[in-house]
Each structure stands twice: as structure tokens, then as C-alpha cells.
Amino acid sequence: MGVNEVSSRVAAFNAEIRTLAERGDGRDIMAWTGEQLAAAAEALRQAEEPDRAAEAIYVMYVSKPHVGCLFDAGMPIDALATALMVIMTCLMAKVNPEEIPVAYKAYLEFTRDLAAAAAEAVPDELLQIIESRLTSLIDGTVAPTQALDIAADAISRLKALGLE
């Protein structure tokens, strides 16, 4: 998949969100973005090796509005779990973070910021997650080669909180 195809898919995605926002009350956007995220993740799982990096970037892109909807609907832990599962989906699809270092690090930073915001909403439960290695992004020590370790650590902490 080339840059033009990704750009076209992003433009269509954004146009549909604008249409839903103009018509709805937000619930339609949450449902639609969830469907789009599931479809993008499935496309990533089925992608051949040359297309995986582009598919992963698209998955990260379409996940952000859905994660935002979850957070705004009062589900900060679900929002954070979704962001972490996006990372794991990319890694399990054998996307090499070193091939997409800017997008990957930006998504880790998005996840770190989401964790910080979620900690304000549910401080006691999420403080452990904030203290995980996601916060090491602040000093710039995260490298794409640490992808699996960071994601696995954060997900294990969510599981310890009872979120499956």
C-alpha cells in the first residue's frame, strides 16, 4: 500500500467523522470509529509484509478518535486498554517499529498522555500504569526496539487491575 492509498483512506475516514459529528450526538461516532478500528486491525492482520507498516500507521490513526470517544464517555481504562491493544496488534502482526519510528514513538507518547489523563480520572488504579515504563518517554529514552517490552509491561498492569 502506497502513501497515496493511505492518504485517500485517511481523507475518507475524516470526511465520514465530520458527517457523523454534524448529524449525531457522539454515540454514532463511537460505534463507527470502533467498527473502523476493527476493520483496520483485521486488514493489518491479513496484510502482506510490504504493506504492514502502512497498515499499522493507519490502525494507529483510526484508533485515536475511538480512544477519544471512550475517554469522553467516562471509560478511561477502556480507552487506555484500547490504545495499548493497538500497540500489541501492530507488534503481533510483525510490524517492525524501527520501520515506522516516528509514528510508533508518537503513538507511544499518545498512550503515555492518555495514561496521564486517565490517572486524573481514576487516580488510585492507574497510578501503577503511569509509573510503568511508558513514562520513560518523558526523558526520550524509549527506542522502537523496546516496543514489545513496554507494551507487555503496560498490558500486564492493566490485567492486574482486572481489565481483560
Image: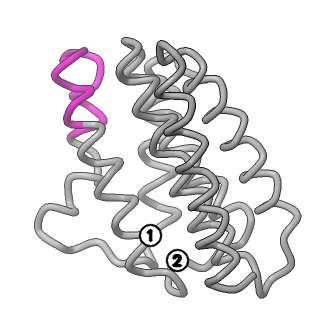
Left or right of 82 on screen, residue 124: left
Say which residue appears at 44% left-offset and 19% top-offset.
161
Secondary structure under the numbered disc 1 in the rendered image: helix
Query: On the picture, is 80 further left or further right than 127?
Result: right
User: Split into 4 quadrants, where in the image is the C terminus?
Assistant: top right
The residue wearing badge 2 is: 97
Question: In the drawing, does residue 40 fall left or right of residue 12?
Answer: right
Residue closest to the eye, 101 or 29: 29
Kindly identify which residue carries mark 1.
Answer: 104
Tag 2: residue type? Answer: Pro
Q: Which residues are magenta?
A: 116-130
Q: Mark 2 falls on what kind of element?
A: helix
In percent of the image, x 55 and y 15: which residue is there? 27
Q: Which quarter of the image is occupied by the N terminus?
A: bottom right
N-term mark: 1 or 2:
2
User: Where is residue 137 drawn, in percent x and y?
Assistant: 22, 63
Q: In the rendered view, does 78 fall on the left or right side of 108?
A: right
How far, Cα to Cα, is label 1 from label 2? 6 Å
Labels 1 & 2 near each other (Cβ < 8 A)? yes
Q: Is residue 8 magenta?
A: no
